[in-house]
Amino acid sequence: MKAMICRRWGGPEDLKLEDIARPALTARQVRIAVRAAGVSFATTLVIAGKYQRRPPFPFAPGTEVSGVVIEADPACKRIRIGDEVVAVLDWGGLAEEAVAHEVNVFPKPKNVGFVAAIQLAISYPTSAGALTWPHVLDVQRGQTLLIHAAAGGVGMAAVEIGKVLGATVIATAGGARKMAFAKSHGADHVIDYTADDFRDEVLKLTNGRGVDRVYDPVGGDVFTQSLRCMAVEGRICPIGFAGGTIPQIPANILLVKSIAVMGFNYGYYVGWSPHDARLEQADRTFALMERIRGWCEAGQCRPHVDRTFRLDQAAEAMRALLERQVTGRVAISMD
């Protein structure tokens, strides 16, 4: 089979399209004929050797796929040959076939195509878990939710889910095109962070009260300024540091405003941490994915992929992400 292979730490240009042997199938795993694969900022960190997990060389990067199950270990209980699915992988997604553990494979919504469905592997459950699980943001109807980087993959998903939950969504995005994109996915208010001080705009929109919840994939000064436009007893969830800087939390603001910081790493629940928790968390992740599938089939969530590329164009897809040329996500299509 063909796959994009990484043989040394480097950039997108170091990946090579190669013919390799099919990956072996082990206990409770399924083999998927890949129809589409996701490319994310995390993918670029993995091939650079800068991610928390380092696959052994040589490997195919990519952790999100959609496709059709063509082989299943007899011990598999939920997934059958012929099922159309989305799957979370440890790596190996940028290939014609991929192998995944059954607990990381989920039914694809009937009304979502294979390309758009790659959003459902990581982006949507990251946002859904952070927004709905009680120990994280636990967004309630009537609350005000501030979402940063709302034109990105997880940000767009958070906008849609925030509206499903009944929140008033304030989104930040950079430039007119990305603002329009966030608005089209349901944001009540959109702030251009390249032109306005979002902190001042948020306080104006909330009549000085501040927001109840903050979803932050950016980090750095965005996190710090978010604390200053939050309501008393608010919650803020950092889910990444796309801005490149890990913030130092001013604990005095947390104390004065009774604010809680709730970190969230969806990767832990699908087996990406030193303690592989995918089996013990399987019921929880399956329930979350079923909830997302219901929202999609009801038309409440509309996964969006901005651009598609062929498998041999994976490096170009990564550069489009790194140069911030896209809204939503990019995907590799095998069709």
Image (spheres, rainbow, N blue to C red):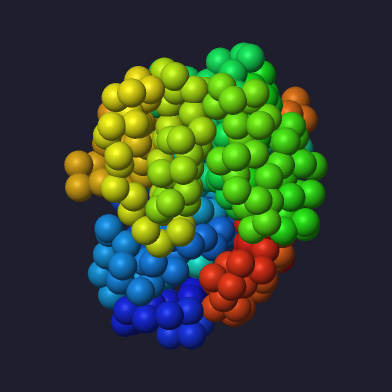
Decide which of 281, 158 is in the foreground and name it: 158
Q: Residue at x 55, y 26 (%)?
A: 210
Determine which quarter of the picture holds residue 167: top right
Hey, which residue is sitting farthest left in the picture? Answer: 275
Q: Residue 137, how many percent across, how many down? A: 45, 25
Q: Is residue 74 left or right of 131 when viewed as pictured?
A: left
In the image, what residue occupies the spot 59% across and 25% down?
208
Q: Nearer the viewer, residue 265 or 71?
A: 265
Q: Is residue 267 visible?
A: yes
**Relative depth, front residue between 79 and 280:** 280
Q: Is residue 47 above or below residue 32?
A: below
Looking at the image, residue 198 sits to the left or right of residue 297; the answer is: left
Task: Using the image, determine if residue 81 lies above or below residue 55.
Answer: above
Query: In which quarter of the view is residue 255 placed?
Result: top left
- Taking the image as drawn, is residue 287 in sight? no
Q: Quadrant of residue 263?
A: top left
